[in-house]
Image: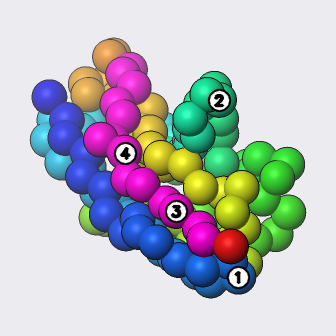
């Protein structure tokens, strides 16, 4: 089993910044990719950003240079630096890991979610 622990959410004013962290522990053979998703009330969960084990990143169109995803592979941790936050960024943010629990078994894991609220 793999456990993901998120931290860093909270309340911030428009234009402010937050840094989310997600650390994985447990039965991990290797990590293929990590990502952040978000879900606002009434909306579907959407991709915010992802990063592969090789460092290739991908961002949702709405990010537009405001967010940066990074990882510390030695610590099995992924980060999301969010700047210039807007009220429409308010959502629950979830980390996701696509990993190999053994050399032949790929699995997806989700964090518990952390609330990000941006006040106007």
| Whole-number angstrom distance, CA of label 2 to CA of label 3 | 15 Å
Give the extent of the magenta segment. Answer: 106-119
Q: Give the mark nearest the N terminus, 2 or 4.
A: 2
Q: Nearer the viewer, mark 1 or mark 4?
A: 1
Q: Residue at x 59, y 55 (%)?
A: 90
Magenta segment main secondary structure: strand
Residue 34 in view: yes
- Do tag 1 and tag 2 residues touch (Cβ < 8 Å)? no
| Whole-number angstrom distance, CA of label 4 to CA of label 3 | 13 Å
**Location of mark 1 (residue):** 15
Residue 32, compared with residue 62, is above or below; it is: above
Q: Which mark is residue 120?
A: none
**Location of mark 2 (residue):** 43
Q: Give the mark nearest the N terminus, 1 or 3.
A: 1
Q: Give the mark nearest the N terminus, 2 or 3.
A: 2
Regarding mark 3 in the picture, which secondary structure is present there?
A: strand
Indicate yes or no whether the magenta region holds residue 108.
yes
Residue 3, horizontal then vertical, whole percent: 19, 41
Residue 72 in view: no
């Amino acid at each position: 089993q793999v456990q993901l622990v998120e931290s860093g959410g909270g309340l911030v004013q428009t234009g402010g910044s937050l840094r989310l962290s997600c650390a994985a522990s447990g039965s991990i053979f290797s990590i293929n990719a990590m990502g952040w998703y978000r879900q606002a009330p009434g909306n579907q969960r959407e991709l915010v950003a992802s990063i592969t084990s090789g460092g290739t990143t991908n961002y949702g169109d709405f990010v537009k240079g405001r967010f940066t995803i990074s990882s510390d592979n030695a610590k099995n941790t992924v980060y999301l630096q969010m700047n210039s936050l807007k009220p429409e960024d308010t959502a629950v943010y979830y980390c996701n890991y696509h990993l190999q629990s053994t050399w032949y078994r790929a699995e997806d894991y989700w964090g518990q979610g952390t609330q990000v609220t941006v006040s106007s």
